Structures are given as structure tokens and as C-alpha cells.
Image (cartoon, rainbow, N blue to C red):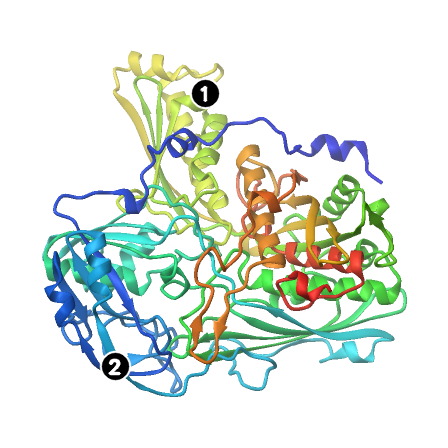
Amino acid sequence: MMEEALFKKAIPSSADGLGRIDGRAKVTGQAKYTAEYKLDNMVYAVLVGSTIAKGTVATIDTAKAIKAPGVLSVLTYLNAPKVPGHQKAKNPGKPEAKSGPLKVFNDNKIFFNGQPIAMVIADTFERAVYAASLVKATYNKEKHDTTPPKDLSRGAAPWDGKDFVRGTADAWKTAPVNLQEEYIQPTEVHNPMELHAIIARWDAPDKLTVWDKTQGVQATQGDIAKAFKLPVENVQVNSKYVGGAFGSALQVWPHEIAAALGAQVVKRPVKLVLTRMDMFTSVGYRPYTWQRIGIGATKDGKLIGITHEAAGQTSVYEDFAEGPINTSKGLYDCPNVTTRYKLVSLNVNTPTWMRGPGEATGAFALESALDELSYKLKMDPIELRMKNYAKTDPDNKKEYSSKFLDEAYKMGADRIGWDARKQEPASVKENGWLVGYGMGSGMFGAYREKAVVRATMNADGTLLLQTAVSDIGPGTGTAMVLIASKQLDIPTDKIRFENGDSSLPDAPMQGGSATTSTVGSAVHEACSILKEKFQQLMGNGGADKLDYVKILKDKNLPSVQVLTKSQPGPNNEKYSMQSWSVHFVKVLVHPTTGVTKIDKVVCVADSGTIVSPKTARSQIVGGAIGGIGMALMEEGVIDDRFGRYVNNNLADYHVPVNADIPQIEALFVNKPDPYINPMGSKGMGEIALIGMAAAVANAVYNATGKRVRDLPITPDKLI
Ligand code: MOS
């Protein structure tokens, strides 16, 4: 099945390459995360959450708390200073506009259970925790709604979305072979290892410095400046190390504003670290989403129509919309596509982007439906996908900048041993376990944005790269060092990457799998310009290898510096740019206990040139693990009687642990995208997860003949 040449191009999982440049700092504890900073005179804040899900605070008694040892202040809506410029709703012009991001301590309204109603500030964390337990509130309780959507009947269209039809609406119904099924993605909480945290210090009445967990120091700087009506340059945001975020730190949340307010009141630096429990209600999450797919094909497997409907939950005060239905518009060459998408407002906190955002939810439904169709057609699932392979973007009719998903299918199928798969479900057993194989594809836009990088070549031959971007864990610094090393032909250990500081040159937030493409381009361009400058200094037309140290010495220069602004060009508009992935999974399911064991995973990414093999592999492995969690374990459960989470801790909210994860193989097509950027590399963070949950569900069906359409696939659903 596999051509030898393809394998030679592939980078095996064991690939050598530069290890993480910050790896040593991280494993030795030298790398300091937000909560680890200790500032002079610093005090500690703890949030008190509402115990009802809807209504108003009737009374709030803080007298005991304020008298408790070490307490400096207890903030509530009654005494907190007003935030002059709270974030606005995204659709302020519309009559039905919601109030927008939660205005913390603004009034006595309660929108969800856990909403902060008070914040205690004390001289130690323990004293703040104790005093917080003394705050007592009474409520005027109203009937809340935390029941997630079950169809399209209750929701409203998101403010920027409407139903979409390509070709004939609901054409799947007319197809000779068709099916319609419903799929549930429950609420999934990012739960990065590092808790969200902030330290806020006012250096002057109009000058604020924060140490904050954020995916974008400058976005946070801008939002905090707006909230407190400060000039942007008066807010300094530091986020040197981030211990995972997966989307949860893409925006400023109420606790960040609360900490800054608290610091204003007590006139001392305030540290606020969310508890694991707070992580379920103080930052966003992947929204519970109901989906229904109708899909139909000719008897030989050519798709006739897909209808993809989705209803996702949002909060009553703010809309959050994402793209679960997008995958159905673009993954396959299908002439008739209908999508409908609604948001249902509930008494919950606002959801947000979570790795592979809506597309991961959508791909679970679509790639499960494709698999279901393949059984109806008695056709191999890969053959069905190849039969409907899109050669140009079916959504916008543009040519792809690059697409080697077909090669990825071949590489992955060969590596997992797809030939061993039996089409007949529940037909293979190994040592008493049912055996099944499944696959699922992923697609996500490959982006490039603007970024500025400052590159300084010093007299000693070391290079300093500086840009504001956060590195939330994928190893951005490592990739940037590799790009610079190649461009300038200098060893990687001579290069330092400085980032995560709002005063550094402009860079967008780390999100949407765009950082290597965006900041990498800026590094690439900065190094090219730097090299030209040295060639000019040397004055021989650049024939020789450049000896940077010698040139600087000869010219008596302490350093040469360039500041380069890089931006996408016309090609980024002209072509449809997508990253592609395919996940292959072999599962074992125990017929008596219903336990699913992931036996083998092979993921193949078509994400252009691989800039940093080691961190790219980690990125794919991490995404696949996230996908396994989504498939088998993760579910934020709310008890509707109280509108409250019942599993808001890591004992009850299950994420995969080492014992759940087999060897995961990451393969890369590793062919450059000729148009996206000078490296030819496309994003990888999202496609690492998108399609994975479907691959697991499809493997479980192949093993057992049981189709689980409501995640997670827990043992009770298989017995
Ligand atoms: Mo990502 S969901 O853009 O952090």
C-alpha cells in the first residue's frame, strides 16, 4: 500500500532534533509561572462564588470576614470601585444584544452558579481562604435553566451566523443510501495543568503591571487598558511561561479584572490564583453541543448531500459562537450542503475556544457519520473518503495552497496496519478483548498574521530574537531558534528567544495554530535582512560563509539590529489554506466490563514543512491525548436541580493519565506549502486533536458493533 518514497519523507516519531530550549528551565523549576512570583508587599485574593444559578443577591454579610485575622478587604458589588470601561458586548447595535462579558462586582445580578459575588484579600493565602468561608449571602432565587440543547427548537442564531445552503437544501434525503443521526459533545473543560493566575500591581494611580497567564500579552494589555481607561502603554503584561492553556487564556476573564480592582483598593500587589474548582466557572470551556447529521450518497459512495445542524450552549449574558458546522462545508467534495447553527442561552458561564474549537466538535459528528455511511455502503472508510476527496475548496472554490491528505491516509493506514481491520464489526478478538480499528480526518484553516521581530546580532556572535508572543507550551521558542539558525547558519545554542512581555515587538496571541506561521515568518524575514546587512558590511557580495563576530570586530560595531514587520501577502488571500490530519486508532474493548483500551495510535499531519521535529511530534501527541480524553473521559456534569457542577475537580472530571495512553506515533507528510509563508509550514495545534474522537468512536464500533454518539464513551455505554 505504501510507497517507499513517502516513508523516506516522513519524520519518524523518534526523530532527533533540537530539544526544547526551555526544557531544562522547566524541569528544574527555574522557569517561573505566574503564581510563583513573589512581589514585595504582596497580598492574596480568594473568590467567593454564588451558590444559586439565577436571581439576585439579597444580602451579603462580610462583617465576620473583614474581622478575620490578616484580612485587608472584602470586595462585593456594594463596595467595589466601578470598572470604568468594562468590555462591551460584541453585537451592541442589535436590540437583543446581551450585556457582554461578565462585569464583576458590578451589581447584584446572578447569571450562573459559581459567579464571583465577593473577593477576600488577606496577608496570606490561607487567611484569605478562611475569611472567604465566613462570607454569607442570601438570595432572591429565580428559576434557572441549565438544561442543554436537544434539538434546534430552543436556540437563536448567533449574531453573525445564518443557515447555509450549497446546492439543494437537505439533499441527503433524496440519496439512495442515507442516514440521519444525532451526536452529543458534552461540556469539556480545558483544565490545563497550570491554574489561571494573575498578580496585579499598581505602580502609579494610572499605571498597572500584571503577571498573568495569557495566550496574548498584548491582547490582555489592550483589554485591561480599556477596562480601566488607561493608555495602553501604561499597562505592562508579563507572561513568560504558560503551563498549557488550549484556548482558556485567549481572553481576559472577570478574575483578572477583579485582581486589578483589588490591588487598587488595598494599594498593594494582589495575587489571585484560581482553584481547580474555579477553573470550571471562572474561565471558559468547550460548550455542550447537540448535533444532527443527515448524509446521503449514491450506491457506489459518491456523496449527494450533507446536512449538519448544531445547537451549542452559551451564557445568558454573552454569546459565544464557534464553527462545528464548518467541517461539513469543506472537508469533502459534496455538491449539496446545508448547515444550521443555534445558540441556547443557559445559566452557565460563557464558553470559549478549546483546542480545535468548533471543528473538533463538528468533526466528531461528521467523521462518525462518514463511518456509519461506510458500513451501510459496505465500503472501506478510507475508500469512501477518497471517493469524495476535495481537490479544490468546495466552500469558496479556491485552489488549495497545498493538500496531501491522500498521502497522509496512505502513510497512516500502512503504519497502523489497516489491512488487518475487518469490515464486519465485533468479529475479531485478541486474548478475550474485542479488537477494532477506526480513523477520522481533521481540517483547520492555516493562518498567517502580522508580527514584528527584533533580531540583534551581538559582538560575541550570539543572536537575540525578541517578540511579544506567548508560548503556552508548544515550544514556540524552539521552533523560532531553529528557523533563525537555518537562516543565519549559526548553531542553535548561540540563539536566545525572548517573548511573553507586552513591551516587546508586536505579535498576535498564540491561538488558532498560527504562531509558527506568523512569528516564524517574522523571524525568517528578520534573519534574512540581518544577513543582508552583514553581507553589505563585508562588501564582497556574500560569496563566503559569514563570520559575524569577525565582521562586527572589523567594523568596530557592538551589534547589528533589525526590527522587521512581517505580514501575509496576496497568496494568503488567493488560495484556500488548510492544515490536514488523519488519526488512526486500534482499540481493545472488554466484552464483559465495557472497558476501552487504546492499543495503538498513528496520527499523520499534512502541515507543510516541519520546522521543529521534536516539538511538532509533541504537539501531535498532545492533541491526540486531548482527543482520547474527549472520546473516552471528559465531561463537565451540571446537576440541573442546582445548576451546579458536580465534578469540578480532577478526581471526578477525568482526563487521560499515562496508563491510558499507548505509544502514539506522529508522522508528517512534511512537504512545503509553497504559498503560505517563507518556511512553507502550516499550523498543527488544532489538527492534532480534530478528528481524533471520531477515530476512537469508529474503532469502538468496529470492535463492538455499538455506535456511541454521545461522548464520552464510558464503559456503561458499551455493556
Ligand atoms: Mo487555541 S483553541 O486557538 O488556543
Residue 491 tag number:
1
Residue 516 image point, x, y percent: 49, 42
Element marked by disc 1: loop
Q: Which residue is mark 2?
A: 138
Q: Residue at x 21, y 68 (%)?
A: 134
Residue 426, quarter of the rendered image: bottom right
- Closer to the camera, 76 or 325? 76
Pointer 1 with pointer 2, Cβ within 8 A: no
Residue 12 image point, x, y percent: 66, 32
Mark 1 or 2: the one toward you: 2
Taking 541 as reference, is 268 left or right?
A: left
Furthest residue to the front? 592
First-in-chain label (1 vs 2): 2
Disc 1 crowd, CA 10 A, few/some/many (<14, 14-19, 20+): some
Amino acid type, residue under disc 1 in the picture: Pro
Residue 269 tag number:
none
Disc 2 crowd, CA 10 A, few/some/many (<14, 14-19, 20+): some
